[in-house]
Image (tube, rainbow, N blue to C red):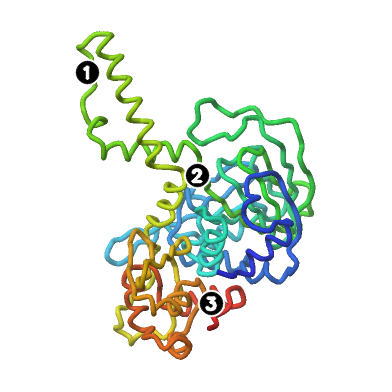
């Protein structure tokens, strides 16, 4: 999938691909600042906040350095049937923004089609799960105190200005669930300065950082997004291998505590031998491939043809579908499933699975293949989705339509 954001991030950071993720701090500027307002504006963010039922921890507000109680900005709207929905009180939120506060909305990709498409493009690029969180700060409201994240992030300053301090590691490869705490900040300042519209920066996992508008003018604001990349570790692979042990009888037997030291030593030897076989049978490459293929399909609009057959589709698999040709059969692995198609469907599948919006009539014309039948199968299984107005809007100007 070609996405303007991915290409722009590579140029800004001086990267050729996603292999630099996590390798060190990097900073740069997007070549096209108009991309910022295309991705998100403060008013578009507030429109999302207004039209959704939100509450902590997905939506939070901070003022004077403290997280506000939800009652300070949420109302409970009761329907005539007695259903209570938490909704943001936009008047109260407006007052907080005027006096200076920070609003945080996590996982905007679940509510906004532009960010959904952007995160999917970043996932195809990085082969990692991606989520985007948004931060709108007004006046001179302080940000979060010095902290570190358990995942790599790319920060994009979409509007306004914000001051940052980034420090190095105080523990190598820290984890959320770890063997030791990581509570003492590093004293090494990697970078300190102001992020302005169009600036981007990559902060690897474990790097300490903080952001504030405390030294900016009181009438200003800042809007930035952080794309979080949750990369897999050796611990994740080992946990996956351990789950595979259930397939092998020796690991399903009870441990024998009554045979004495010699019996326990023998059992230890047998299990250790089986562990070596298990690890050899499930290499890291298999784990990474399985993780991509077994990702569940994302939620999408599915009309089932009630409003007429779809005229255009787009692949919505979380990761690029794996395609392999065996003799005269093409196998596609995606969304927890395996599909088999006749080899002659290859050119049409390449267009349908490209991640780009595609008109089915164009596929028919270019390949001579019944694209409607192929698309129906892919839509039914969650690999592709009908190109709704929202999805089309999320792609416009960012993901070009596929060409034969």
In the image, residue 348 sits, relative to residue 315, either above or below, namely below
Tell me where residue 121 sits by quadrant: bottom right
Residue 1 image point, x, y percent: 55, 69
- For the residues labelled 3 and 1, the Cα–Cα distance comes to 62 Å
Query: Is 5 in front, or is 368?
Result: 368
Where is mark 3, residue-wise? 393
Q: Residue at x 37, y 61 (%)?
A: 335
- For the residues labelled 2 and 3, the Cα–Cα distance comes to 32 Å
Is residue 132 found left or right of 385 in the rendered image?
Answer: right
Is residue 243 found left or right of 91 in the rendered image?
Answer: left
Query: How many numbered discs, if any?
Result: 3
Q: Residues within 10 Å of mark 2 (few under 14, many from 20)?
A: some
Point out the frontmost of discs 1 and 2. 1
Query: Is 258 in front, or is 141?
Result: 258
Residue 187 image point, x, y percent: 74, 30
Residue 178 image point, x, y percent: 50, 30
Where is mark 2, residue-wise? 232
Please report whichever mark, 3 or 1, sits nearer to the chain's N-terminal start.
1
Is residue 293 found left or right of 21 in the rendered image?
Answer: left
Q: Residue at x 33, y 82 (%)?
A: 373
Please report whichever mark, 1 or 2, sits nearer to the chain's N-terminal start.
2
Point out the frontmost of discs 3 and 1. 1
| Element type where label 2 sits in the image | loop
Labelled pair 1, 2 in contact (Cβ < 8 Å): no
Where is mark 1, residue-wise? 256
Query: Is 359 in front, or is 301?
Result: 359
Q: Residue at x 33, y 61 (%)?
A: 337
| Element type where label 3 sits in the image | helix
Please report whichever mark, 2 or 3, sits nearer to the chain's N-terminal start.
2
Query: Is 154 in front, or is 222?
Result: 154
Labelled pair 2, 3 in contact (Cβ < 8 Å): no
Q: Residues within 10 Å of mark 1 (few under 14, many from 20)?
A: few
């Amino acid at each position: 999938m070609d996405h303007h954001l991915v290409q722009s991030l590579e140029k800004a950071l001086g990267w050729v691909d996603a292999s630099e993720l996590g390798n060190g701090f990097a900073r740069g500027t997007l070549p096209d600042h108009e991309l910022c307002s295309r991705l998100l504006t403060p008013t578009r963010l507030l429109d999302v906040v207004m039209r959704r039922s939100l509450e902590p921890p997905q939506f939070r507000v901070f003022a004077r350095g403290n997280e506000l109680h939800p009652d300070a900005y949420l109302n409970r709207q009761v329907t005539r049937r007695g259903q209570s929905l938490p909704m943001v009180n936009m008047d109260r939120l407006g007052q907080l923004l005027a006096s200076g506060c920070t609003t945080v909305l996590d996982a905007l990709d679940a509510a906004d089609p532009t960010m959904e498409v952007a995160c999917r493009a970043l996932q195809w690029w990085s082969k990692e799960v991606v989520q985007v969180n948004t931060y709108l700060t007004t006046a001179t409201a302080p940000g979060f105190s010095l902290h570190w994240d358990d995942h790599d992030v790319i920060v994009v300053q979409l509007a306004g200005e914000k001051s940052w301090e980034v420090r190095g590691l105080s523990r190598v490869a820290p984890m959320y669930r770890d063997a030791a705490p990581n509570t003492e900040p590093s004293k090494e300042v990697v970078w300190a300065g102001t992020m302005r519209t169009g600036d981007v920066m990559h902060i690897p996992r474990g790097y300490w950082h903080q952001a504030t508008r405390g030294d900016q003018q009181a009438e200003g604001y800042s809007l930035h997004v952080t794309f979080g990349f949750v990369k897999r570790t050796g611990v994740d692979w080992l946990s996956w291998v351990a789950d595979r042990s259930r397939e092998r009888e020796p690991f399903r037997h009870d441990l024998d505590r009554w045979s004495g030291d010699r019996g326990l030593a023998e059992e230890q030897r047998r299990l250790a031998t089986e562990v070596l076989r298990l690890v050899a049978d499930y290499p890291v490459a298999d784990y990474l491939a399985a993780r991509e293929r077994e990702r569940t399909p994302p939620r999408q609009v599915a009309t089932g043809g009630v409003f007429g057959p779809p005229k255009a589709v787009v692949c919505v698999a979380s990761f690029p579908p794996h395609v392999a040709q065996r003799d005269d059969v093409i196998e596609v692995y995606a969304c927890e499933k395996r599909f088999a198609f006749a080899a002659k469907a290859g050119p049409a599948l390449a267009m349908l699975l490209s991640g780009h919006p595609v008109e089915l009539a164009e596929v028919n014309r270019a390949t001579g293949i019944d694209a409607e039948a192929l698309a129906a199968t892919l839509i039914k299984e969650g690999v592709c989705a009908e190109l709704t107005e929202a999805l089309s809007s999320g792609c416009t100007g960012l993901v070009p339509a596929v060409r034969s």
